[in-house]
Amino acid sequence: MIPRYSRPAMTAIWSPESRFRIWFEIEAHATSALAEIGVVPRAAADKVWEKGRDAVFDVARIDEIEAVTKHDVIAFLTHLAEIVGPEARFVHQGMTSSDVLDTCLNVQLVRAADILIADVDALLAALERRAFEHKHTPTIGRSHGIHAEPVTFGLKLAQAHAEFARNRARLVAAREEVATCAISGAVGTFANIDPRVEEYVARKMGLSPEPVSTQVIPRDRHAQFFATLGVVASSLERLAIEIRHLQRTEVLEAEEYFSEGQKGSSAMPHKRNPVLTENVTGLARMVRGYVVPALENVALWHERDISHSSVERMIGPDATVTLDFALARMTGVIDKLLVYPATMQKNLDRLGGLVHSQRVLLALTQAGLSREDAYRLVQRNAMPVWRGEGDFLALLKADAEVTRALTPEQIEACFDLGYHFKHVDTIFTRVFGRA
């Protein structure tokens, strides 16, 4: 985790203090469950909670013990015994390290998912507000980066909203997929611990029991989780690239907010660069980079190995912290995005009406021409305009073959900009449930 790209709430989930607190809760709940079924004394379970509930676990002390034991869970249990006293011998009865580590990781991922879902909600709200603000703002649609036909800027934002609504659903599903608990002991057989303990701990920690844990929770769950983060990151990059293109000097239809006192370049004082969306693009690459290691973690040896452990210690915090920051950054960009309708109209008109070529093509076919002949006539008049030689409407009116099929009024009707926006309300209703 790099502080520059981190936010406190998400970072806190992955701190040693949070991790050891979750470990304690798992162990203490398991001990309480063992007391309920008569395996350990109730007084011992109560003492664990009494001593540990408000304890401040000494990270430095745990690290000191681990330097000798070379085992993080044993180091924690040794430190817990120093806090609890003799009753600590009843802690971790029948459990194995993965019971603690895997359950803790899933608690952390669930909490991280809750933050990410809230992040997406904030982005959705910003996109919706700006989409309705520019619902009828005409702009040029582009295919292959080339002027195609008119759209509205609100439709561009509505598309992004629909995509992130899907991403929200994906995150909810990923949260559910990873919200499982394993307290099943060595090789996952429950030989030394009753399945009721797992059920109890799962309920207390807001998780569901893992049906078959084989000592570790199956990593296909985690693969789906991190793959989902990768998809969300890709959607962020898609939106970021759109804004970056629109901010290019030759386009300049929209740009990131430029604050008072902000500097764009150390060398060129005039520069206003799309640094935030460029940053989001880079962060998206990092989040996607964590997906392949998560997929490779699925294939573990037999009932358990720890080849996944080092991977998850890095990608767990890094992927969630990075995506959290990127989502928040994009929300800020959309919220304060500077939009230039006049420039959009200027760019729309730049090709001298060529953006209406399909309407002329269709009108000619409706008038009886074959599609091939209609296409030939339209293209014949369009190419000079593309080269900067004349006006499309004027050339069409001067073309005898065109005017034999269409009256001047019919040709002019093909240049109605509003024609392209007659179904905007329909699209908005589909996306937002209202027009």
Image (cartoon, grey):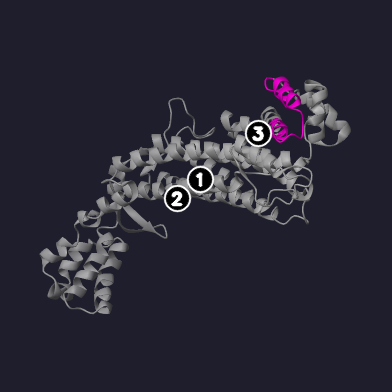
Is residue 431 depicted above or below 255 in this figure? below
Q: Which residues are magenta?
A: 27-54
Q: How many marks?
A: 3
Three-letter residue code for mark 1: Val
Tell whether 53 sits left or right of 243: right
Whether the magenta-drawn stretch holds residue 143 is answered as no
Res 314 seen here: no
Residue at numbered disc 2:
166
Residue at numbered disc 1:
172
* Secondary structure at numbered mark 3: loop
Judged from this view, the residue extending furthest toward the front is: 38
Residue at numbered disc 3:
14
From the viewer's side, name the closer residue of 28 and 242: 28
Tell whether 208 sits left or right of 71: left
Three-letter residue code for mark 2: Arg
The numbered mark, 3 or 2, whose residue comes first in the sequence reads 3
Alpha-carbon span between mark 3 and mark 2: 27 Å
* Secondary structure at numbered mark 2: helix
Q: Residue at x 22, y 67 (%)?
A: 360
Q: Residue at x 73, y 41 (%)?
A: 99
Tell whether 315 sits left or right of 130: right
The numbered mark, 1 or 2, whose residue comes first in the sequence reads 2
Alpha-carbon span between mark 1 and mark 3: 20 Å
- Quadrant showing the N terminus: top right
From the viewer's side, name the closer residue of 214 and 133: 214
The numbered mark, 1 or 3, whose residue comes first in the sequence reads 3
